[in-house]
Amino acid sequence: MNLAEELIGRIRSVIGADEAFVPLHVPEFHGRERELLLDCIDTGWVSSVGSYVDAFEAEVARISGCAHGVVVANGTAALQVALLVAGVEPGDEVLMPALTFVATANAASHLGAVPHFVDSAFDTLGLCPLRLRAHLETVAELRDGQVFNRQTGRRIAAVVPMHVFGCPVDMDGLDAVLRDWPMVVVEDAAESLGSRYKGRPCGSLGAVAAVSFNGNKIVTTGGGGAIVTNDEALAKRAKHLTTTAKLPHKWAFLHDEVGYNYRMPNLNAALGVAQLEQLDTRIAQKARLFSAYAQAFRGLNGAALFRAPEGSVSNNWLVTLVLDPALAPERDTLLEMMNGAGIMTRPVWTLMHRLPMYRDHPRADLSQAEDLEARVLNIPSSAYLGARGGVAV
């Protein structure tokens, strides 16, 4: 039996053999979604203000371990504004992993900043602090307490740790680097709502963070995002900028700077309130699914189930397999066979420096990210699969 057949059989032992096609991750609505949406319609509060916006902001902040939340139209907008309020300016460079979804780089680009790509760690799939330090020692210098790229002359203003598939980055390692190379930390927590690093929620590990509620995330508002922070001034500025920079007044339309219409409608926020009520249940279901996969893959040759390192708790947003290095050339064949068998399987994203718009951007040696790109696969991870309570054979 080849590896594809072995994987298909073991995955089917967990998710069941009765479904012709099993998606990678689907939205689920098992709570008060219909009730709260109808309330918006019945009361007429469907647009960009309303009680559900306020409630959703407060609850997202609480879950993220932060004092303040600002909900917006999508996760990319959240990260763009998070970078802006954190002090990133046009022409600055922003360090981020090459192994990330394109929105991470796009958010910096929308500000006129320059994504600067760094390598990833095998144990977290996220930014590698050791490789980051080595890179900075090669290309960076300190001037008046700020970090500059000696090769480009640009300021390196921020670093964006992105918690890949819900697994937290090694934040202690990153903090150690930043003691020598000071810059602001803006978390890309798009995929990590409910994940924790050494007891602290993702989203509370930097100056400010961005969360996503896209349709494929662990909870969804259809489309949406949030900025979370413990800094009241940053939160107020984020709220002001994302609501067209409009000054409070009984009737006048007064705006004091160029803002953004990134507001989340009350309808979407209502959906989010109902979804967050189910987050603990969904995380528990995903933990059961992960455990079933772990049992099913025991003794498997050729691939290993990725696990968050000790001290981290992942929300298990997407269950991940890592192929043995010798099998990297077979990745696309495995994808073809598994998807052909009705088991939706996806590779990790194309690395940012391979995309045409980012090909010439500054970057570190990316050999570990390139290795991971060739070997990482995601398999069906919907929470409902873990709700069945089945145990792998």
Image (spheres, rainbow, N blue to C red):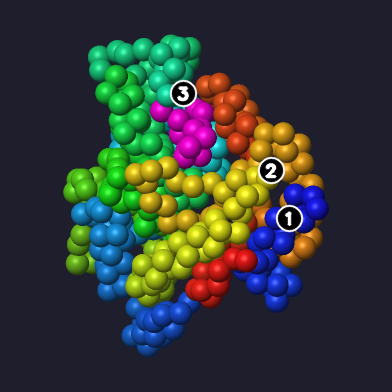
Q: Secondary structure at mark 1?
A: helix
Q: Nearer the viewer, mark 3 or mark 1?
A: 1
Label 1 to label 2: alpha-carbon separation: 10 Å
Residue 31 position in % (x across, y down): 41, 80
Residue at mark 2: 302
Q: Residue 325: x, y in percent?
A: 67, 34
Do we see residue 226 in this rendering?
A: yes
Q: Quadrant of residue 287?
A: bottom left
Q: Nearer the viewer, residue 237 or 144?
A: 144
Residues at badges 3 and 1 in contact (C-beta under 8 Å)? no
Q: Earlier in the sequence, mark 3 or mark 1?
A: 1
- Label 1 environment density (alpha carbons within 10 Å; few <14, some 14–19, many ≥20): some
Q: Which residues are magenta?
A: 118-129
Residue 243 placement, left or right of 306? left
Q: Say whether marks 1 and 2 touch (CB < 8 Å).
A: yes
CB atoms of marks 2 and 3 within 8 Å: no
